[in-house]
Amino acid sequence: MKTIILERPGRFTASETPAPTRPQPGNALVKVRSVGICGTDLHAYRGRQPFFTYPRILGHELGVEIVEAEENARGIGVGDRAAVEPYLDCGECAACRMGKPNCCERLCVMGVHVDGGMRELIEVPIRKLHRSDALSCDQLALVETLCIGRHAAARGRPAEGEWTLVVGAGPIGLSVMTAAKLEGARLIAADLNADRLRFCREALGVEHTICSAEEDLPQRLLEITGGALPSLVMDATGSPASMEASFAYASSGGRLVLVGLAQARVSFDDSEFHRKELTLMSSRNAAPSDFAAVIQQMERGLIDAGAWINRRASADEMIEAFEDWTDPSSGAVKAVVSF
């Protein structure tokens, strides 16, 4: 079967690999239809992804069609379309017992710690499949990204009308904004890239945006809010410098959620941290309940992320196109690869 392998940073190869046969008990065999490209894939291509080894088959944002599955309590059967929850948890560690499989102590993420979905067929645990009769495979490939935003928003718990700053307007930042907006937050988006901020305004309806390459971010925050810093800040950049700066953007008594992952140490001024009595949180991956909720919201028309997909390629075209997608100036919001 056709398989795309990231042999080393900057080098993909197209290979023919053996197709899986009958799936193991509890698993399903699925045909990969759509693969979303995310920051993790871009970082892996550049050689900057934590917890990563080469060679690796990328692909964890997947829209799939079921080819073979044993009878199961979830009613998933041949021909169904599904999103894949790519977080393979052990089910036994302390985090799993607490109901937090997204931060399992032995977590393996498809396309990161183990091979992912950039191939025609894969075997997936049935419990990691989230079916939808209404959504296309392209839409289902966006579900995982949207779930990360929903999980981050659940950590921050934006209130109706609460001033909420989202730093970083890449796909993860967009997913955080989408989730926070559904909770009724008053959104402010900040980014270095004016084109990304234009997309936030036009596609998501974000009223207030700040281009931090051109404007004084703290001063603009005070102007927008009428003199008070936002009480919730969520940083989706994965940049240590941005994450450290975000401590200064939250109001006294506020909350800061670090969504992006950096392969570095992040430090802050402890006296200011204590003076403000900030609540600092991280957000990792998403929970199974996030997948069910996001799919339901998409099916009800509450989330329309179709405009995010502005780059497409077949598996044959992807290798040549990928380098361009890594360039922030290319204008790529979300790329989807079809198998």
Image (spheres, grey):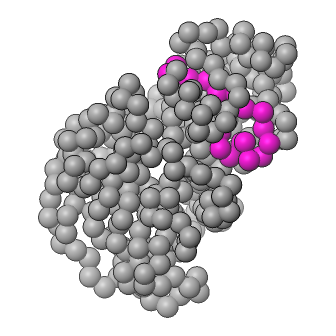
- In this view, 220 is above or below 337: above
Query: In this picture, is 243 found above or below 314?
Result: above
**Residue 300 in the image, given as x and y percentages of width and height:** 68, 63
Left or right of residue 180, residue 310 in this image: left
Q: Is residue 121 above or below residue 313?
A: below
Residue 78, position as x, y percentages in the image: 42, 84
Viewer-proximal residue, 248 or 310? 310
Q: Which residues, given as a range, are shown in magenta? A: 176-193
Left/right placement of residue 319 relative to residue 104 reads left
Q: Residue at x 22, y 74 (%)?
A: 19
Q: Is residue 178 magenta?
A: yes
Residue 15, can we see it?
Answer: yes
Quadrant where the image shows the C terminus: bottom left
Give the image quarter of residue 203: top right
Asked whether 7 falls inside the magenta stretch, the response is no
Estimate the x, y position of residue 200 in percent, counting from the top left: 59, 33
Q: Is residue 192 above or below residue 4?
A: above
State the residue at coordinates (34%, 48%).
312
Q: Quadrant of residue 10?
A: top left
Which quarter of the rendered picture does the N terminus lie within? Answer: bottom left
Q: Can you give x and y, in whole percent of width and height, for residue 251 in the image? A: 80, 22
